Amino acid sequence: MARINDHYRKLRAGYLFPEIGRRVAAFHAENPDARLIRLGIGDVTLPLAIAAVDALRRAADELGTAEGFRGYGPDRGAYDFLIDAIRAHDYDARGVTVARDEIFVSDGSKQDSGNIQEIFGAGCTIAVTDPVYPVYVDTNVMAGRTGPGDERGRYEQVLYLPATEKNGFVPGPPEGSVDLAYLCSPNNPTGAVASRENLADWVAWARERDAVLIFDAAYDAFIQDPTLPHSIYEIEGARECAIEMRSFSKRAGFTGLRCAYTVVPQALTGSDADGARVPLNGLWARRHATKFNGVPYPVQRAAEAVFTPEGRKQTGEQVAYYMTNAARLREGLGGAGFRVFGGENAPYVWVRTPGGTPSWEFFDRLLSDAHVVCTPGSGFGASGEGYVRLSAFNSRENIDAAVERIRETFRS
Ligand SMILES: *Cc1c(COP(=O)(O)O)cnc(C)c1O
């Protein structure tokens, strides 16, 4: 008898995005002529930078020649040309040294942030912010670390740290101890960014409690304020307590192409059953070697091209385009009396619903009256109730039209 993994049954059945899809489809069926503007999705919309496209083409041509053909990648699946470009541009440039064997290239930060829990014991306790990127929680549910969930989608054994207006949507470390803490900055969904002080508090806490921080920096390229940290390793001592993840998805439009990486410093250890220290790098290397065969060569060349002068210019312009969208959402809705957060160093704007209207009720109103699709904040966690997330990933025309329609709908 093939007994199933019962923990999967504790998952809330794909609640948020399917429910949005259902409501949008129902609206569409009744209003076939309405032109919807979708500000709900967290996917990029601009085409791939030409520098990356050219690199893809060249690499594909190379693979079709006797001299240029390549099969499986090197030992850990990643070529040094990409590893060294990452080290130079994402780390050396910020005064952080990361060694080649500390970088693991993969096909996505979703996978990495979901898979990383495998190298930790089944008994490890976890903390997440609330609202939260659901992957961190769901993968721990699947692994049996969370206990049962309640009807609001909260799991008994997970420590939720509320991200609220009071703490600027950036919670500090908890009073108690947990083994793993997931942080995401710039944040999806709130658009808030952790300050240097906040991250220093987290690092001090993790070192004192012997906890591991899992730092997801998928949106670091959207940081505009030069005083804000891009990498957790900009904080003294983080190499002993933090794993970091970055992705080419949002910074360079690779959501379809797929390339990301995870940094596991050599100095970072966990403990075995006898309390002996074990480097986590070796464990992740082993997992990577056993379960993954690397990112396609042309995709690694395309990722490398993101760091060339042309690639940086082109992807920089894309980020600037989205950030202008975010500013227009902020200003347009803020000027109409909405309380808006985020959107200054992140492509997401976190909007307080008027009068504390429940997130889904506000979602329905935006859909039916403004023909705009948002993401209900409550779908990311209990503390997201009374907020919605608007995405800046869209055309300028759609952003401006959406702002105008929302203003019109709520003109009182
Ligand atoms: C989009 C996103 C990622 C990136 O995922 P990929 O698998 O690299 O596309 C990672 N973390 C968060 C919080 C995200 O929103």
Image (cartoon, rainbow, N blue to C red):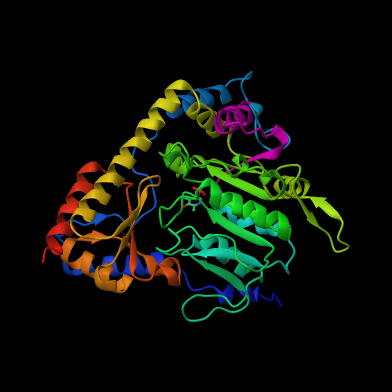
| Left or right: 276, with 367 as reference point | right
| Relative depth, front residue between 298 and 286 | 286
Count of marks overlaid on the render: 0
Q: Position of residue 310 (x, y in %)?
A: 42, 22
Q: Position of residue 16 (x, y in %)?
A: 41, 67
Which quadrant holds the N terminus?
bottom right
At a point 59% along the width and 27% down the height, the residue shown is 88
At a point 48% along the width and 57% down the height, the residue shown is 170
Residue range highlighted in magenta: 81-109
At a point 34% along the width and 39% down the height, the residue shown is 46
| Left or right: 34, with 259 as reference point | left
| Relative depth, front residue between 3 and 233 | 233
Quick check: is 338 in the magenta stretch? no
Whether residue 198 is situated above or below residue 84 in the rendered picture: below
Predominant secondary structure in magenta? helix
Q: Is residue 53 visible?
A: yes
Whether residue 101 is situated above or below residue 238 in the rendered picture: above
Quick check: is 101 in the magenta stretch? yes
Location of residue 180 by image quarter:
bottom right
| Left or right: 291, with 365 as reference point | right
Q: Residue furthest bottom?
A: 151
| Relative depth, front residue between 358 and 51 | 358
Q: Residue furthest top?
A: 67
Q: Position of residue 203 (x, y in %)?
A: 64, 51
| Relative depth, front residue between 63 and 271 | 271
Which quadrant holds the C terminus?
bottom left
Location of residue 224 by image quarter:
top left
